[in-house]
Image (spheres, coloured by chain):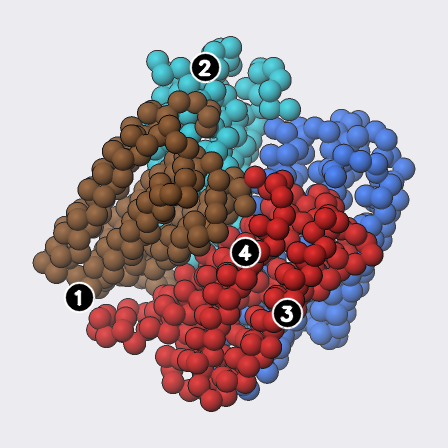
Chain colours: A brown, B cyan, C blue, D red
Amino acid sequence: LSPKRTEAFSDGVFAVAITLLVFNLAMQGVPAHLATALRDHWPAYVAYAVSFLTIGIIWVNHHQFVDHLHRVDRPLLYLNLVFLMWVAAIPFPTGLLADYLQAGHDQSVAAAVYGIDMTLMGASFGIMWLYAAGPGRLLTVANRAALRSFLLRFTAGAPVYGVAILVAIVDARVSLALYALLAIYYAAFIRAPEEARPGRSG
Amino acid sequence: LSPKRTEAFSDGVFAVAITLLVFNLAMQGVPAHLATALRDHWPAYVAYAVSFLTIGIIWVNHHQFVDHLHRVDRPLLYLNLVFLMWVAAIPFPTGLLADYLQAGHDQSVAAAVYGIDMTLMGASFGIMWLYAAGPGRLLTVANRAALRSFLLRFTAGAPVYGVAILVAIVDARVSLALYALLAIYYAAFIRAPEEARPGRSG
Amino acid sequence: LSPKRTEAFSDGVFAVAITLLVFNLAMQGVPAHLATALRDHWPAYVAYAVSFLTIGIIWVNHHQFVDHLHRVDRPLLYLNLVFLMWVAAIPFPTGLLADYLQAGHDQSVAAAVYGIDMTLMGASFGIMWLYAAGPGRLLTVANRAALRSFLLRFTAGAPVYGVAILVAIVDARVSLALYALLAIYYAAFIRAPEEARPGRSG
Amino acid sequence: LSPKRTEAFSDGVFAVAITLLVFNLAMQGVPAHLATALRDHWPAYVAYAVSFLTIGIIWVNHHQFVDHLHRVDRPLLYLNLVFLMWVAAIPFPTGLLADYLQAGHDQSVAAAVYGIDMTLMGASFGIMWLYAAGPGRLLTVANRAALRSFLLRFTAGAPVYGVAILVAIVDARVSLALYALLAIYYAAFIRAPEEARPGRSG
């Protein structure tokens, strides 16, 4: 199996998962006072935006990863499948977070579940990188230095996810803000690896 | 990241979002008198058709945009992600508009939300064009003149969206008709830029 | 816009629409006697199978159509969009037919709505063929004869859809059987045009 | 129709079906005690993981199959469509299994339905292989030996599915465990055919 094909399938999962988030925007039934209902529905919009941007940024990161591969072996394929399993699940904790922030109880549980999915996804992604960087030599060799700094900055986000899960116990809205900040961090942080790599993806 | 890859991901989001609109056609439960229920359900069909054609026409416009790019940089990628966030959200205001036109109350709020999503999507698209046309020189140079007339006609639609949002206060059905007319306007208006550009996409 | 790109977008809509049919298999809530509930649920399985095969066969036909094109112009793009609008809607009448065959009332209305969507889809497809075969010369010239016989056999299915809609008044199950037969007819009937055309798609 | 195109459409169905599984994670309404509700919801997570990995592994197997084809004929196209019909249906028995394991009654029926879908999917896949290996010579000739061993190991899984369906009568959780083991078996078992085949997919 070529990297290109793995990428096409992964892209399909990303595109469907990101678009399914719209179901979390829908309200239960047809509320009598729409303006009020829409205002109280704010957690749904914030959760939609945070998850949409997060999946979008993961997609960019994943592409960079696949761009670095010169071939794909069986174990990587299954590591990628496990990674996609956490990505495709994102609409579930997104819905929980939106629902419970609006319901006004158990927000901390919902925010923690959100963070756990993000952490598992991040861990799966990190394991893929480490596996590909290992003796199997799936990665193109010239990028070792850029890769190491990439992995360092990538891993730096992990404890913040841990903090966001703990913060959820106190205030789930602060957790949500941290998840948004992490999305922005990952959007900014991925800039370097590509610039360090000459040509090919153009 | 190449324009081609960005396009593939965007196409995925377009295809899923346009097909998810079908959920807005479904009726609550299994109504006792189907013929009557189907007749009263007309706003769902109109909203489906308007949103389907709108997303389809945006897709054509977006393709033209990507065709004009010779490369994609990081900021553009994120501008595109924000743009797709409004596109993927379209099934939500479409459902609101259908539900509230049928419910017979708060139609104006629903029609305004629809117009706001359209306006935000249009604004994001315009910002992408302006960014790509700027000093970053992401656009192929030969098309500057066609581009300027394109952007003028594109921006000309914006105030009509504003009018449609205001008209929603009086009659949401007139808003919906304006949204349909705007889709037709954008379908007609995009003809020139392609014809002005020689070769390449064939 | 190239035929290839139009095809990719159309394929996305086909793939999503065909997979969304699974929602029509789901039962309301968690029935107390699953074995009985599953048995009474048979119209959902039949409707799923008929719609799945119908969309799959349309996909094959559509590919053949796009294979015959050497270029795509603006009007064709919009005719294709209207065609896809009826394709993407198929899960709606499929759900109606399944629900009302099981409910035991208004089946004829549901079966007629199903037939109307199929007829509009078929008509849109026929119009695309006629437009592409017209003076715009979007079709590769060598296939004129194969095309004419193709269109004849294609149009021959149309009155049967009309009959199926009328038969729905008497017995919706007979209509459903006719829709299944039409799918088989279209699966068999498309064989010739491809064989008449040498090379290219291989 | 080329193998490449059939593959693209099939990939779309795989990607959408695998991502739609997330709907089975959602809980009914907004439970009062989220932590308890999430704990009792465990069958949904297990069913999600088993079905996700199963679809992912089928996707890998399907790719290998298409890689072995040098051309696609009409009957194969329809055999593939029937195969995809069982794949796209997987979210339905997945939801049944999750719901009834949690409800605590009729689990055996739900687990049997799951196994039946898996068996029909496997049978369709086997028929495709046999058809392609037949006198139509759709398969590249060099792989005959690898193919035979592939088919043997493939067929070896079939009786285990039968056992899992029977075991469902006693304990549906054991069935679910068997389905998970079968996914792992198929993930391991497909390794050889690719290694036996030189080049091409890279």
The reply to whether label 1 and label 4 mark residues of one chain is no
A129 with respect to C102 (left or right): left
Tag 1 residue: A105
Q: Chain of mark 4?
A: D
Q: Residue at x 71, y 64 (%)?
A: D127
Classify residue A32 as left or right of residue C54.
left
Kind of residue indicated by mark 1: His
Q: What distance separates the C-alpha of mark 2 from that of mark 4?
A: 56 Å
Amino acid type for the residue under numbered disc 3? Thr
Cα separation, mark 1 vs mark 2, equals 53 Å
Write down the quadrant of residue B85 in the picture. Answer: top left
SS at badge 4? helix
Disc 1 versus disc 4: nearer the observer: 4
Relative to C33, residue D121 above or below: above
**Residue D56's x, y, as percent?**
49, 57
| Mark 2 or mark 3, whichever is nearer to me | 3
Which x, y percent locates residue C6? 62, 36
